[in-house]
Every structure is written in C-alpha cells, then in structure tokens.
Image: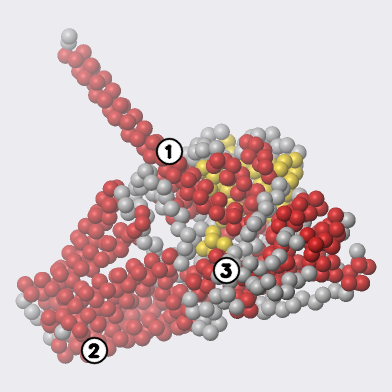
Amino acid sequence: MTASGERSIAAQSVNIAVTGDNNHIVAGYSSKIDATATDLAGAVLAMETQQVSKLLGARGKRIDLVYQYVPEPANTAAGAEAQGRLTDILGYYRNLCPHRLVITGAPGAGKTVLALQLMLDNLDTRDTRRVPVRFSLTGWDTVLPLEDWLAQQISVRFGIAARHAKALVGQRRVLPVLDGLDEMDAPDTHVENRRAARALDHLDIYQDTEGSAPVILTCRTDQYKELAASEVRMRDAARVEIRPLRHEQIIEYLTDRIASPTRWRPVLKAVADRDRVLTKALNSPWRLNLVTTVYERNRVVSESHHLADPAELLTFASAADIRDHLLSHYVSATLGRHPDGDRYSPPQTHQWLAKIATGLAVAESAGSGGTDIALHELWPLAGVHRVRLVDGLLTSLLCLAALASVYGMLSLFPRPGVVAPPVELFWLPTLWRAGKASVPAPRTLQLHRRRFRMQRRQLRRVVVIGLLGGLLAGLLGAVAISYAFACPWAIAGSYGLAGGLVVGCALGLASALTAPMADAAPTKSYVQPTDPRQLVRDDLVTGLMVAVSFGAAVGLGLGPALGLAVACTFGLAVGLMFGLYWWGGAGRRYLVALCCLRGRMPWKLGAFLHWAAEVELLRISGAGYQFRHRELQDWLVSHPYPQEPQQAPAGAAAQSR
C-alpha cells in the first residue's frame, strides 16, 4: 500500500472516531434534555393539579364547560369544530393545524380552568415531546423577546439550568400556555400602546420548523375583540369562546354542593323557571363558587350559627346587585369556612386586601402589571416618596456611623488623609442607590438545588474565583494599611491578605449560591418553590452574609492596630452599606416599607399574604400571589371598607323581572 493510501485510511479512521464521539456527545446532551423535559412535566403536573383544586374550592365540582368556535376573517387554524366541551378539550386542540388556540370568555367564565384541563389531559398522556407550562403574561416586559422570557421563567421557577431551559424553548419542547392577555394593560390604555398588542406581535413571529409554533392563549372576550378590531390578534389560531352556563348546569352544580335542598328550594325553582336576573348572576363557575361559599354552612362555627337565607337573592333587581351582595360577604364567609380563618378578623382582612388591590390598580395604570403580588414590589403602598426618603435617611445614618468611627480613629493613623475620603465618596453613590425608584430583583439562594456533582463543581469554581479576587483585594489593602499606618510590609501584608481572603471567600460563596446554575442534573425531579416569601428572605440573608464578611475582614486587617471592637464596628457599617445597597436591595426596601406601613398593614405582611393564600382568598402564582379572582380584586378597590349593600324591595325586584 502506498504512503498516500495509508494517510487516507488514517484520516478516514480519525474522521470516523471524531464523528462517533460527536454523535455520542449529541446523544448524551439530547438524553439530558429529554430527562429535563420529563422532570419538568412532573413538576408542572403536581403544581397545576394543586392549582385546579384551589380554583374549584372546597368540594368544588368541575363543570363541563361548553365553548364554540368563533371564525376570524383570515389566518386561522384548520380543523376547528363548531363546538366543544371541557371533557374533550385535548382532542379538540389536537385536531387544530397548527396547534394554536385562543380561549376567550366573560370574567369568571372558566378560561383558566379550561386551559388547565387541557394541560392536565396532555400531561396525563406522558407525552413529553412538548410539555405545557403556564405563564402569567402580566409579568412580561415585551421588550424582552418571547423565547428569552419563557426560558428565563422556566429556569427561575423550576430550577432548571439556564442553557437547558433555552434548549427546551428553542427546540419547541415547551408548549406555552399564556394566561391573562387582558390583564397586561389598564382598561383605558389605547390599543396601539398596549403591551398586549406587542405580545401578540411576538406570538405572530413565534415559529417552528413547520410554521407557526403551538401556543395556548387566554383573554377576556371584550378585550380580545378590541384588539382584533384593530387587526391585532394571534394569527394561525382558532379562537373559541366559553358560553355562559345553562340553567340545567346551574341547578346541577348547586344540587351537588348544597347540604339542605329545602333552604335552596326557592333559588332552584327560580333558576328552573329561567329567572332572568338570577340566571345571569350565576351563569359562571366563579359566581357559583361565590354563592355557595356565602350561603352554605361554615365548617368551624357552632350549630346555632344563623345561616343566611339564599332566597334573599330573589329580592335584588339586577345581576350587578347580586354580585355586589355576594362579594360583600365573601371575605367573612371564606374565613368562616377555614379552620385557621380566625387568625385575623374579617374587617382587618378586608381593609388590608383592599389596600393591596388599590396598589395593584395604581401599578396597572402605570403599565407595570396589575395582578401579581410580590413582596419586594409592595413598597409603594407606604407612599413612594415616603419610603425612598426613609430609605435614604437610614442610609445617611449608617454612613454617618461609619464616618464617625473613621474620624474617631484619625488620630491613630499616621496618614489620615488616605482613610476618610474613600468612605466619604462611598456615601454619595450609596445614598443615590437607596433613593432610587427601581428595586433590583431579589437574589435567591440555590442551596436546595446544589445537590449534584456538576453543581458542586460550579460552586467550587466560583469560590476559587472569589478567593483569587480576594487575594488581589488583600494585596491592595495591604498597600493601603502599610501607607496609612506606616507599618512594615510583612505585618500589613498579613493583615491585608487575611481580610481580603475572608471577603473574597464570602463574596464567592454568595455569588455561587445565588447565581443561575451552569448545569443541572436531570436525575431528580425539580421542585417548584411554594413560598414567595423566600425571595425576600434569601436576599436579606446574602446581603447580611456579605456585611458580616466585611466586618470580619476589617477586624482582621485593622483590629491589631485599632482594637478589634472598633475595627469590626467600622467594617460592619461599611459592609452593611455594600451588602444591603450594592449587593442586594429588594429585602432592604421591603423592611423599610414595613416600617413605613406600621399601623396601616400587618407587621408580618408576608405571613398575612401566605395565610390569605391558605384560606383561599389569594392563590400562589409563580414567585408571587394573586387574588382568588380578578372580580374580587376589582371590587375591593371600589369598596375599601366593609359595608353592607342596599337591598332592593322585593316588590320592585319582582316588577323588574
């Protein structure tokens, strides 16, 4: 064989080997993505099953909702049937081509329930080629591309590595279920300026290899019609509209939920006779849950407790009057039905929730969403200018304490001019940061996700980088100590290096425990955080960790010369400025807001919100809370104090019908 032939065979062997290795790497990465998709499906199934039970309420009955197809002028999905039901929503959706569905309906009609049923039916098939994940559109800043936002949400909410989340979205392994298009803007926002319109533009260019990528979208009918009238809608999609409940469905639901048919006989008879006002007031799942919550027996009250007579519903002249009457009793009735409902009184609960709802309305009018309740975003409730002023005042006191300690120690410095100016210059930018209107996102600890070898490897890598940075800072600190104290380099170097290593290790550890994971092991199920309070807690813990490390570093560096107590006090003051104002900030602003809200809101605001979610006045949504229903939130805004609505005379009501 010639030399050229031998080289050719060798080259082919190398190519085969390299190709085989690449195939092995690709197959390994693909298996990781498959396993990640499987774990994501399990987490979503557990989370949304719990969410459905919360939406249905105690002894909730799932109503077989009816929806009908609404033809659009052009660019619609093929295969849509004229009508469908809740129980066959998955089959209805799979017949569409492409798989793009818009679910519309009146407030409380069951749009979210229908979307959740579609998700659960899909997940029950164990098909992880495309995992449905629900996203609340109110938190999307449409400046961020849709794919980036979806990947970001998946990574944060489910603890999935950022690159794996991007791969899931990029490969269209995630079916976005986008909930609440109508809640992205204030009602008086012009169509052209609505975030919802920009969101629909993003959805129109959301593609896969076959064209328009699958999406499920929910929106109130009126808001979607307004957008569609301006030729802004989701293209290549089928739109369905949930129909109001028929009187047979209302009777079936009430019969299943009530304990005493005798008490409810007048109401059941009026519905059977198709009473116009009563049927219109109870023709949605939310309203039926509302009426049974108000009029059914409370589980925790004594047998002698007086039960209101449902027949009084027949005395109201309009459906709006019935709605207001039910909502006025909903808070107290809900608390009465829960074993832990007596922790706060109904009037207190009503007023506090109304204040939060008002704050959400203000935020919505400013175009920053109006449904999600995040602890670190509630500080405007205490007054925007007041909180920023108090935050700046506390910062000034902290800076003054640091400066006082510096000026008190100047006599100990052979060269005091090198010490005071840096602290003074650090004060001004810290004060500016404290008074800013924007608050940085909270830093979340990832301790519960650092269980696997790849994650421990990343932890070690970041800590080593922090130590190297601390070593460099220690050298600079040694130079400063040597110059300020005119001491030998060996002594200054030992103190400076010790302090620098302490700070570097602390910063590296804090960075590693709060940074997004570079990789994630797909062998365990990911856990959805169920306590939105954890975000603020983690932000405060990491900020204090950095502050304490600064105090310890300065104590090691300056303690032998100035005294350990004085040096640590100075270091802690500087560390608090860095840790709470430059490293973090969300937790600090929350604490300042609590101080400003003293007497107007509960001191343990986070505990109150979590309790409200447990008694089903609120619900947990991702990293925040939402009201049980938007109708309740809007009603609380217009009724900040508990009050009894006026009842219409029975005769007038009868004449109006």
Q: How far is the residue under mark 2 from the one under mark 3?
A: 58 Å
* Residue placed most toward the observer, 165 or 435: 165
For the residues labelled 1 and 2, the Cα–Cα distance comes to 62 Å
Q: Earlier in the sequence, mark 1 or mark 2?
A: 1
Circle 3 is placed at which residue position?
Answer: 339
- Number of labels in the image equals 3
Q: Is residue 356 above or below residue 173?
A: below
Dot 2, crowdedness within 10 Å: few (<14), some or many (≥20)?
Answer: some
Give x and y (percent) for residue 171.
47, 39
Q: How busy is the neighbourhood of tag 3: few (under 14 within 10 Å), some, or many (20 plus)?
A: few
Q: With respect to residue 159, does 93 lie above or below?
A: above
Q: Give how far across and how far down residue 144 sits, in percent.
A: 50, 54
User: Considering the image in quadrants, where does the C terminus appear?
Assistant: bottom right
The residue where tag 1 is placed is 34
Disc number for residue 407: 2
Tag of residue 395: none
Quarter holding residue 267: bottom right
Residue type at tag 3: Pro
Residue 462, placed above or below residue 410: above
Q: Is residue 506 visible?
A: yes
Between disc 2 and disc 3, the foreground one is 3
The furthest residue to the top: 1
Q: Secondary structure at mark 1?
A: helix
- Viewer-side residue, 92 vs 262: 262
Q: Residue at x 45, y 70 (%)?
A: 439
Secondary structure beneath label 2: helix
Quarter in which the N terminus is drawn: top left
Left/right placement of residue 45 relative to residue 187 reads left
